[in-house]
Image: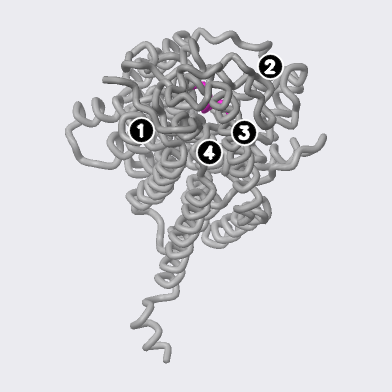
Amino acid sequence: MMRFLRNRFGTPADALLSLSALIAIILFAYHFMVVAHYAVDVPWADDWAVYYPGDKRELPQPFNFAWLFSAHGPHIIVTTRVMTYFLYLTTNLDFAVYQILNFIIFGFLCWLAYFLLGRLDVFGKVGRAAICVAVFFTLDSKLWELHGWIGTGSNMHFVFIFALLALLVLYLNEWPAPVRMFLGGLCLALSMLSSGWGFGWAVGLLGFLLIAYLISLAGVSDTALCRQELMRNLPMFLLLIAVGVWLQLMSKEPTPELAFPWQAGYWDFALNVTANAFGFDTYSRMSWLLGLACLVICLVPVFGMCFGLRDRKDFITALVIAAPIVSGLLATALTAIGRGNPEIFAPTSSKSVHYAAPLAVAMPFVVAGWLYFLRRWRIAQIGSVAALLVALLIGHWDGLRFASRYAPVSYSKQVALRCYKDYVAGIAEQANFDPNPNRYNWSKPALCNDLRFNMAPVLRNAWNKRVSFGTKTVIRPWQPPR
């Protein structure tokens, strides 16, 4: 019997790895079906900006580079803008299609993270199964904002995808050094052009190189190796950081009163975001203590892997694992500076999903960090990784509540769309159902759903641009004369 099972399924480790991969695929497929089911061709939150008349974020006609590089809040989101315009040309910017495509890109990101860790070739089958389990917690419904709020979700996905590709190009292939530096630097530049969070990747990579070098001075690692890796990458990272600073200055966005690490509000916000990345999304006056524990869980493997670096393979492995963790923590720290002032932003806003996303997506790397850091102590490795996965399970205990997260937003969009159609029907009736909506009386206010401003100019602008959402609100199909 045992021989039959072994021939059929391989060793228990093989079966565990296959089972974890199968569950991840099923979870992604189910989540995909939920997203597709609840997708509605109506913008949500900041996604409305593409229709605001006269706004610098307004979808241009024709295409221009000023719009491509215009700021969205404090971020330059070039890659998201490229995808937006591509969908405008191919689907008339159907937001339901946009939402579905956005989730497919997120699925590619999850696969890329697992593939990158597999390329390190330092984890056994049980270790890879543990990493695959960590991927579960990025595929549940906790990150629902990223899959419904297109402008925020897509730019975060592109930041991570290009940054992980940079790690793959720079450190995990045998291409000539100039080619690796050029292509890797290009990927990191694209990461920074995707969002301000990409800036954290260049800083995080350089930061880990500095940490490893400083720790090596104590004689616990090969100092010559750490110095060589630091000096080899220093010019590229300094150039990228300079580009990142320039991009931030380009945004020219007014900033609210900032919070700083010597203020209590900063740490309350930052630690609650850190806890939220682990799935603990309930705010309380003491929830920052949970965030402090989560911060320690992230930092211990980062610093621990800096000890005992004796050859380049060890160094590259530690760098690839630590980079997403450090960049996620840096993104959290920078977000706390801009959002941590309790006099401007409610402390409960620290539990908004999109603030926790950069660190939440790095959870497979946190698990990998503990696996690699404790690789010489088998019992400690198994115990710590099991405890970490249990902690993630506790934080994500309600992660399978897909409908309760997507249905309210979908219903709100459907109610809004019905209201817009009723509004257009009203002004069309006043115009005796003229087939040309440009002759409607758009000056009548359109106050729909819970939006507190007049949507009439936005609706008219959406129709004039012939976008999918705008044309669905008019009474009769009409094409302007050519």
Which one is nearer the viewer's eye here, 220 or 26? 26
Residue 222: numbered disc? none
Q: Where residue 456 appears, x then y in whole percent?
A: 57, 20
Q: Is residue 302 visible?
A: yes
Q: Determine crowd level at label 3: few under 14, some 14-19, many 20+ residues with C-alpha closer than 10 A.
A: some
Q: Distance between the residues labelled 4 and 1?
A: 18 Å
Front of the two marks 3 and 1:
3
Which residue bears the numbered disc 2?
259
Q: Determine crowd level at label 1: few under 14, some 14-19, many 20+ residues with C-alpha closer than 10 A.
A: some
Lower position in the chain sequence, tag 3 or tag 1: 1
Front of the two marks 3 and 2:
3
Lower position in the chain sequence, tag 3 or tag 2: 2
Disc 4, SS: helix
191 displayed left or right of 343 = left
- Residue occupying image coordinates x 36% and y 52%: 118
384 displayed left or right of 19 = right
Q: Is the Cβ of the residue at disc 1 closer than 8 Å to that at disc 2?
A: no
Lower position in the chain sequence, tag 2 or tag 4: 4
Which one is nearer the viewer's eye here, 29 or 138? 29
Disc 1, SS: helix
Which residue bears the numbered disc 1?
87
Q: Distance between the residues labelled 2 and 4?
A: 25 Å
Give the prevailing secondary structure in the magenta stretch. helix
**Residue 46 falls within the magenta-colored stretch:** yes
Front of the two marks 4 and 3:
3
Q: Distance between the residues labelled 4 and 3?
A: 26 Å
Which residue bears the numbered disc 4?
146
Q: Give the range drawn in magenta.
A: 45-49
Three-letter amino acid code of the residue under disc 1: Leu
